[in-house]
Image (cartoon, helix red, strand yellow):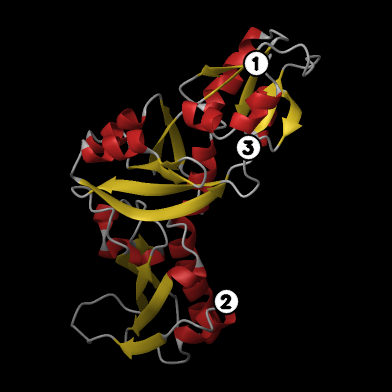
Amino acid sequence: MRVAFQGDRGAYAESAIAQIWRHPVQHIPVPTFTGAVRAVYEGDADACVIPVENSIVGRVEVAWDALAAYPGMQTVGETLVPVRHCLLAPKGATLQGLSSASSHPIALAQCSRFFESHPWIKPNNMFDTGGAAREVADRGDLSLAAIASGAAAERYGLVVLEEGIQDQRDNHTRFVAVVSQRSGLWRRTHAIRGATSVEEDDPQQIAEATRELLGQIVERNYLELDEIVSVLFTLTQDLRSVFPALAAREMGWVGVPLLCASEIPVEGSMPRCLRTLVQVELHAPRLLDTHIYLREAVALRPDFGGS
């Protein structure tokens, strides 16, 4: 999953990405809000996060303009990111020795009181908080500072001269996650199929095969238990020693509705086969590895490349 955001590494948008997507995604930094939305529209990213409102400055108009420029986008989630601005500078810098502090114009506007009380430090517009921190680190000038997050200080090896310099202690920004309506990623409900096999009708073998199959479905699709809506198991009629749902319960799936059924005994069908259909509702849009076939059941769907 590729997620674009406006800015550079260390921007607050990366915190928004981490809050919306609980599984690993690829972060794609883009210089402008329009560029982030355009990346989704043109297929260079699967989604983007855009800040649309801040508790101090209000609507982020440039972000709304970027969304309006591409009407084929659809909002699929949102989150509030606490904004605690820090004054960052190279090691050895002092507050009195600074001449300027760079950041995104919106971040600078959130720190007006700081500049009023430190008139020798001039605000300097940059395209992003993280980018400002990176430039200050690259230049190494002890008179130059950046206003960004504490995470940006760690990323770029800067020191925090002042912490929490925003005008309001409870400062936060609302980010939205956006995908293209053409991608299908706006769909939250999916069904994942799987199948496996055992050598004989033995409760332990069926339990082990069930745990392996469910474990692969969860791991390869980055599923969380509360995203699983229900599970249907079917077994060929030569397997009758135990319910596979028992293994699922032993895995901790106690709040998930489970149902076991018998496969239609079609002549020539694979023997000793266990199938499942897992219905999920995702917290955040993402690409799924989807259907998992293991052991001898790989032969049922060779088009999945033995997955």
Q: Earlier in the sequence, mark 1 or mark 2?
A: 1
**In the figure, 106 relative to 222: above or below?**
above
The label on residue 166 is 3
Q: Residue at x 32, y 84 (%)?
A: 236
Q: Are marks 2 and 3 in contact (CB under 8 Å)?
A: no
Pointer 2 residue? 251
Helix, strand or loop at disc 1? helix
CA gap between label 1 and label 2 equals 48 Å
Considering depth in this image, is 232 or 283 the residue closer to the camera? 283
Considering depth in this image, is 290 or 175 the residue closer to the camera? 175
Q: Residue 35 location in percent, x, y?
A: 32, 28
**Relative side of 157 to 213, left or right:** right
Q: Residue 237 location in percent, x, y?
A: 32, 89
Q: In front: mark 2 or mark 3?
A: 3
**In the figure, 244 relative to 123: above or below?**
below
Q: Tell me if I can see residue 238 in this picture.
A: no
Considering depth in this image, is 306 or 223 the residue closer to the camera? 223
Which amino acid type is shown beneath numbered disc 2?
Met
Pointer 1 residue? 137
Q: Residue at x 56, y 82 (%)?
A: 204
Q: Earlier in the sequence, mark 1 or mark 3?
A: 1
**In the figure, 19 relative to 228: above or below?**
above
